[in-house]
Image (cartoon, grey):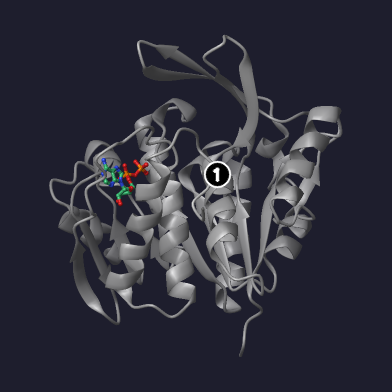
Amino acid sequence: MTYPQAILSIGECMVEMAPRADGAYQRSFAGDSFNTAWYLRQVLASDWSIDYCSGAGTDAISAEMLAFIAGAGIGTQNIRPVEGRTVGLYMISLDNGERSFSYWRSHSAAKLLAEDRDFLKAAVSDKALIVFSGITLAILSPEHRATLLEVLVDARAKGARIAFDPNMRLRLWPDAPTMTGAITAAAAVADIVLPSFDEDSQSFGDTTPQETIARYRAGGALTVVVKNGAGRIFAWDSAEGTVEVQPHVVSDVIDTTAAGDSFNAGFLAARLAGKSLGPAIEAGAVLSGKVIGQRGALVDVLG
Ligand code: ADP
């Protein structure tokens, strides 16, 4: 069966307020799964369609976010309109160059993205690749999390490949066991798992990237790529075996926001283009290397 050249990324995009040198705030939009969709759009040929699946309100800022997403060349028809809610927001504070983040997202429309099973089923249908993350899971109720995983299992059975970045943010979860349980269950419905070693060592107690690979492999993943900041990337694929890649040195790291999200986009785009594991990891590392050399989550990587 030939699958349409279509990708769906599922999660939450938020308003970003970032301080400028003159004291004003610059408004943008970002969020891990959205950042990956945005970078996929930058690097993939135009015969690929990329859609975002989320929730948004029916107010002015929600409309502005939808216009921003559409303006980036990403489809918005799978963003559920949720009456009476709006989009989440985060604000960046700078203290002597150190960034900290404050969030207003507890009642965001995106938290209801899996409320309507039929809407979700329509969103995932006829996609070659579906991307989601631990943050996608964290914003959902336990019941909606189960709906999402059931819909993904069904889409996978129909031929879609599923990519999952565990992206563990403990403060979004009631407790660590709930988080690790949900991450393990989600990874078990994925073909491709894209963890970061610092998070997995902290949350699962892995002492080496090989242990991280072994754990997701035992859960059924067919490809696992363990990112590790500036450190060596370890990966395994059921058909290609194990690979190690040392990312090139980025001498002027400005802002590591979206390093992992852009890595995922570069890696997945290369896999969709038929690249083998090592070169695809190189492509992810090159893309994220460009992203961390500039300020902000969404930066120009083509120029
Ligand atoms: P996350 O943002 O999810 O925590 P990482 O910090 O592991 O992810 O970074 C993802 C990828 O970005 C790495 O695998 C690497 O390719 C690249 N990267 C991140 N930090 C650096 C760095 N300091 N130097 C070079 N590459 C980096």
Tell me the quadrant of ligand 1: top left
Q: Quadrant of residue 6?
A: bottom right
Q: Residue at x 43, y 37 (%)?
A: 294
Q: Quadrant of residue 131?
A: bottom right
Q: Is residue 64 above or below residue 19?
A: below
Residue 147 horizontal/vertical position (percent) = 63, 53
Name the quadrant of the N terminus. Answer: bottom right
Task: Inspect this view and state whether residue 29 appears.
Answer: yes
Q: Nearer the viewer, residue 100 or 169?
A: 100
Q: Is residue 108 above or below residue 135?
A: above
Q: Is residue 10 above or below residue 153?
A: above
Q: Residue at x 71, y 47 (%)?
A: 69
Residue 136 horizontal/vertical position (percent) = 55, 44
Instruction: Determine the residue located farthest toward the left in the rendered image.
Output: 207
Which amino acid type is marked by label 1?
Answer: Thr
Q: Which residue is mark 1?
A: 136
Q: Is residue 70 left or right of residue 302?
A: right
Q: Residue at x 30, y 60 (%)?
A: 225
Task: Inspect this view and state whether residue 84 appears.
Answer: no
Determine whether the beta carbon of the residue marked 1 sits less than 8 angstroms from the nearest atom of ligand 1.
no
Q: Residue at x 24, y 60 (%)?
A: 213
User: Label 1: how many residues lie within 10 Å, few (<14), some (14-19) or many (20+)?
Assistant: many
